[in-house]
Amino acid sequence: MELKEGMICKHFKGETLVEKNIYQILAVNVSYMGENSIDLSNIVIYKSLFQDGKVFAREYDDLVCELTDEQKEMYHQIQRVEPLSDDELLQINDEEFKDKKLAYIEEKYGTKKTV
């Protein structure tokens, strides 16, 4: 699997799509423009689609690493982050799903967001 800018992905933790964190890839192979030379070619910038202000940076290899056999069985994913299927993309745009997702986030984190 190759992560690409704009891709919508799910994190492995969570039994259902409502429980999984859902991210949009903002940038892959980031360029650093400061005075010091820093190699960020392996860094991915991504944001949460359902939590305002949650933007992250992580090494590419960490995001696409293969899960343990136990994690694969428990979470039904092979890699830490995987692209959403076409059906899942349709699902996350459904109003009923959005309501459930936002209620889950509010219950878990105590935060609200309107989609």
Image (tube, rainbow, N blue to C red):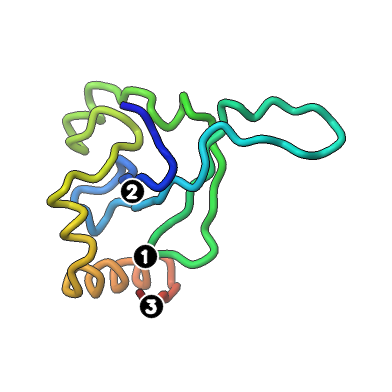
Contact, mark 2 vs mark 3 (Cβ under 8 Å)? no
Q: SS at mark 1? A: helix
- 2 or 3: mark nearer the eye: 2
Residue 100: % across, % down: 22, 70
Closest to the observer, 75 or 17: 17
- The local crowd at label 1, few if under 14, some if 14 to 19, many if 20 or more residues have their Cα within 10 Å, is few
Contact, mark 3 vs mark 1 (Cβ under 8 Å)? no
Residue 54: % across, % down: 52, 58
Residue at the spot of label 2? 8
Q: Is residue 97 above or below residue 18?
A: below
Q: For residue 114, which numbered disc appears in the image?
A: 3
Closest to the observer, 20 or 40: 40
Counting residues from the start of the chain, the first of labels 2 and 3 encountered is 2
Q: SS at mark 2? A: strand
Q: Is residue 6 above or below residue 101?
A: above
Counting residues from the start of the chain, the first of labels 3 and 1 encountered is 1
Residue found at the far left of this picture: 87
Residue at the spot of label 1? 108
Counting residues from the start of the chain, the first of labels 1 and 2 encountered is 2
What residue is at 42 percent from the left and 32 percent from the top?
63
